[in-house]
Amino acid sequence: MAQNESDIAYNKALITALNKFQVARTEIMAEDVSSNLSRVSLKLFEITKTTAEVKPVFKLLYDEKPTPFLRGPFL
């Protein structure tokens, strides 16, 4: 029983560490892209408000506002 509890605690700690790594890696990637562009940036992840889960996204921002990738009648 104690072994199972320690395994669960270890797995939770591992998941937390992996989530922190993913967030840090994504922030570094976004900073690298943003440093080369003055008014355009990318949003590569969002944190859900209810579960605090990190979800990957790919959003183009222009002056910090979401911008559609394509414009025209085909949207």
Image: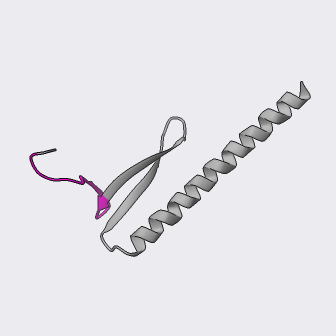
What predominant SS class does the magenta segment belong to? Answer: loop
Q: Residue at x 45, y 63 (%)?
A: 30
Is 15 situated above or below 39? above
Tell me if 63 is positioned left or right of 70 in this view. Answer: right
Quadrant in the picture for residue 14: top right
Q: Residue furthest left?
A: 73
Tell me if 43 is positioned left or right of 21 in this view. Answer: left
Is 62 situated above or below 69? below
In magenta, the rendered stretch is: 61-73
Q: Where does the C terminus fall, quadrant-wise? A: top left
Q: Position of residue 45 (x, y in %)?
A: 46, 51
Q: Residue at x 34, y 73 (%)?
A: 37
Q: Position of residue 7 (x, y in %)?
A: 82, 35
Q: Position of residue 31 (x, y in %)?
A: 46, 68
Tell me if 65 is positioned left or right of 49 in this view. Answer: left
Q: Position of residue 13 (x, y in %)?
A: 74, 44
Is 29 situated above or below 72? below
